[in-house]
Amino acid sequence: MANTNPYTLSAQELAAQREAEKRQRNMIIVASIVIFAIVAGIVAAVIFLLRPATDAEWVSRLRDVFLIFMALESLVIGVALVILIVQIASLINLLQNEVRPILQATNETVNTLRGTAEFLGENVVQPVIKLNGYMAGLQRVLELMGIKRN
């Protein structure tokens, strides 16, 4: 008996889905380890640079820590900009390849409906209106002649 439920997955699809979930879980673990290592390195650098020293050395070390934080901040901003550019490119691709054809099909449908409405107006509605006008005129003539009562 064939599988008729569209929401169930075959064994191959289920295995592929599990493999994708496993890959995603591994990437999250690796990213977490890398982020933890970066944070630990920053904390170690700050502790090392802010060890007790003379007043002049303390100010220069504070300046060095500030410069390091500024460099890391610019690195994070650069990564965010790259991600933003990739997302904008994806949005442009979506607009060009999916939204534009939908808009074109909608425009064609509207033009077809406009033509249908004009055709019906010219070939159905106008003759019916003219017929109603003639019938009203005939009815009025019959009323005036006394053949038909009000």
Image (spheres, rainbow, N blue to C red):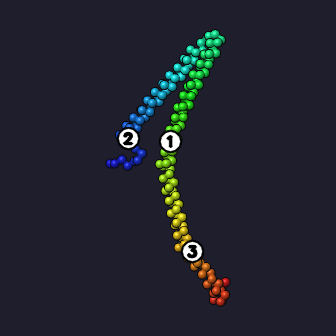
The amino acid type of the residue labelled 1 equals Ala
In the structure shown, which secondary structural element does the residue marked by tag 2 occupy? helix
Which of 14/28 is in front?
A: 28
Query: Which quarter of the figure is the C terminus placed in?
Result: bottom right
Residue 58 numbered tag: none
Residue under the point 40% across and 38% down? 17
Sequence-first tag of 3 and 1: 1
Give the left or right position of residue 66, taking residue 90 as reference. right
Crowd around label 1: few <14 · some 14–19 · many ≥20 (10 Å): few
Which of 25/41 is in front?
A: 41
Residue under the point 32% across and 48% down? 1
Crowd around label 2: few <14 · some 14–19 · many ≥20 (10 Å): few
The amino acid type of the residue labelled 2 equals Glu
Residue under the point 44% across and 33% down? 24
Disc 1 target residue: 89
Mark closer to the observer (3, 1): 1
Question: Does residue 135 appear in the picture of this structure?
Answer: no
- Give the quadrant of residue 143: bottom right
Q: CA distance from mark 1 to mark 2?
A: 30 Å
Whether residue 94 is situated above or below residue 61 in the rendered picture: below
Which of 41/3 is in front?
A: 41
Q: CA distance from mark 2 to mark 3?
A: 61 Å
- Give the quadrant of residue 68: top right
Disc 2 target residue: 13
The amino acid type of the residue labelled 3 equals Gln
Q: CA distance from mark 3 to mark 1?
A: 52 Å
Disc 3 target residue: 126
